[in-house]
Image (cartoon, rainbow, N blue to C red):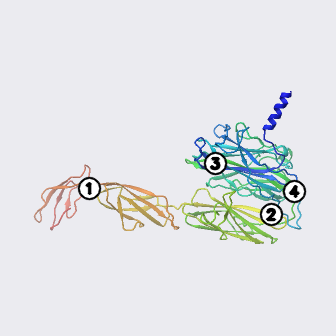
Amino acid sequence: MRWSSALLLLLALLARPVLASHLLGGDLTYRYIDNLGPAAAPLRYELTLTVYNNCNASAISPATDAEIGIYERSTGAHIVMTTVNYYNIYSYTNNILIPTQPLPACYQPPVIPGCTTSAVTQPYITQKFVALVNLPNTTAGFYAVYYQGSRTSDIINLANPGGENMELYTTMTPPSIFNRSPVFTNSAITVLCSSDTTAYLSNALDADGDELEYSFGQPYGGSLPTTFTLPLPTVVYATTNAYSPTTPFGTGRGIVNHLNTSTGVATFATPTIGKYSVAIDVKEYRTIGGVRTLIGTTRRDVQIVVTSCPPNAAPVLPPPVATSGSTVVLPRSYTIEAGTSQTIPISATQRNNNLLNMTVNSALLDGPGGYNATLNGNAGTVSGATQTGTATATGTGSVLGTFVYAAGCNDARTIPYDIAVTVEDKGCAGKTVYDVFHITVVKPQGPTAITGDAVICGATTSTYTASGGTTPGFTWSVTGGTIVGSSTANPVQVQWTTAGTGTLTLRGVSQGGCLTDPVTKNVTISTAPTLAVAGTQTICQGSSTTITASGAAAGATYTVTGGPVSGTGPTFVLAPTTTTTYT
C-alpha cells in the first residue's frame, strides 16, 4: 500500500498541472514554411495558438507555456518530439512546450458613464504561443493538438463547465499541398444583448484563396490522446433547454441559432442572460486534379456573453436587394475582370445619432505595394496576428467607407476575396453589426482558336485569324518565322522562314491591358522541292505543246500559271495565244 501511494505521488509530480477554471476560448492555426529544416525533420511549420483567459478579480494567472502534441495524419500515431523538432520538449510526454508571448493588459469591455447593464461581463486576456517546428517528411500531413483545463465555471449551456477541459486541434497538410490555415479576424469573446437578435462575426481569411465552409461544432473537452482519433471527446451539455452543437442557445420562443455557412456570420438571440460556449469549424476546400477536396479543418472555441442592455437601435447596413421602403441597395457579391476596378460605398446609419466606428478587414487591405485596394484612401494596416489588413472610418449617426479595389492582372482566382465589415455603435448599450462582401476576380476571356495554314511549303507568307473570346486586343508571337506588319493585327501575316515545325502563339489583351492564356498553332514548314520540266518550251503562234513536271514528292499537286492550260498534272497542254511565260 505504501508503494502504491508513492507511485501515485510520483505520477502526480510528473503530470503537468491542470490549472483552475480560467479558459474562455481559443484556436490553433499553422502555416507551412519550407523544407529547409534538419535532415531528420526537414519540414518547417509555424504553429500559432491563441488562448482567451479569464482575467477578473478571482481568476488565476495564464499558463506560462502550452503543451502541443503532434500526430501522423495517416495513422494517428503520436510522434515523439526531440530537440531536433523544437528546442523546448516536455520529456515526460515527448511533446513540445511553447512559451507564452508577452501578455497584453486585461481587456475589460467598456461601459459608457451613465449607461447601465447587468452584472454579466467577461474581461479577458488574449494570449499567444508561436513556435517554428521541424517535422519529418510526410505524404499525408499531421495533426497538432492542444488542451488545457479548465473552462470558466459559470457557462450555463454546459453541465459541468468548471470540470471541462478546452481541447483544440488543426489539420496540417503535407508540403505537396502547400497551405496556411485560415485565420479568424476578430475576438473569440463577444457580448450580446438578451432578447435581441444580434450578429457575431466568425469569418476567417485564407491566404491561399481556398474555399471556406463554416459550421457549428460541439466544443472539445478531452486531453492529449495517445493516438489521434476523430471525433475527439466533447463537452457535456446541460440537460435543460435542448442545448446541442447546432443549438448552443437551446430552443424555444425568442431563441435564434443561425450560422451562414459561406460567410461565417452567425445570428443569435436568447432571452436568457449568461455565458455560453460555442464551437465553430472552418473547413478548407481546394480543387485538386479537378476534384473539390477537403484539405483541413480549423476549430475555434468561442464564449458568448449575453447581458441585459438598455433599449437602443442597432446600426443598419443597406440591404443587398431592394426591399419595401428601402432607398439604397448594396449588393454583397461582385464579379470583376482582372485589370478593372470595383467601388463599394459601404454605409451604415444609427437612428439615435450615436458615434459609429466601421472596421473593414480584408486580405486586400495589405498596405502600400500589395493589392491595390483602399478604404477612404487608406491602403490598410496589416496585423501580425491575422496576416490581413484593416482600415477604419467613423461618423456620427452615419458612417461611410468607400472601398476601392483595382484588380491586378494576376489577381484572378476562383474563390472570392472576402471583405469583412464591422460597424460598432459607441453609444450607451451600443450594438455591433457585421457583414461580409465578396469580390470574385475572373480572367479575361481570350481567343480560343487560330485559323490558317497548318502545312506550308518553303518560304511562304500565310494569313492567320483569331476567333473566340471577348478581348478587344490581340498580340501574336512566332518561332520559325517572322510577323509581316503589326503583331497586334487580326488577321496577321506570317513569313515562314525555317523548315521544320514553327509555332504561332496568340494572346488576347483585355481592356485593362491584361494578357489572356495563350493559344498556339503548330505549323509544318516543308522544304520546297527542285522541279524539272520536260517537253518543247518554244512554239509557234497558234500551236500548242505538252510538258511534264517532276521533282515533287509522291502525291504532290502541280499547278501551272501564265496562260491557257489544260490538264491536272503532272502533264499539261499549253496553248498560248500571245507570247507569254508559264510558271
Task: Give the residue type at disc 3.
Answer: Tyr
* Lower position in the chain sequence, tag 2 or tag 3: 3
Across and down, in percent, residue 101 comes to: 73, 53
* Lower position in the chain sequence, tag 2 or tag 4: 4
Judging by the rendered image, the residue that carries numbered circle 2 is 431
Q: What secondary structure is marked by label 4?
A: loop
Judging by the rendered image, the residue that carries numbered circle 4 is 120
Judging by the rendered image, the residue that carries numbered circle 1 is 528
Would residue 159 be visible to someone looking at this image? no
Q: Residues within 10 Å of mark 3 (few under 14, many from 20)?
A: many
Give 179 or 99, whichever is nearer the viewer: 99
| Count of all numbered marks drawn on residues in the image | 4
Judging by the rendered image, the residue that carries numbered circle 3 is 45
CA distance for labels 1 and 2: 83 Å
* Lower position in the chain sequence, tag 1 or tag 2: 2
Task: Give the residue type at disc 1.
Answer: Ala
Q: What secondary structure is marked by label 3?
A: strand
Q: Residues within 10 Å of mark 2 (few under 14, many from 20)?
A: many
Dividing the picture into quadrants, the one containing residue 428 is bottom right
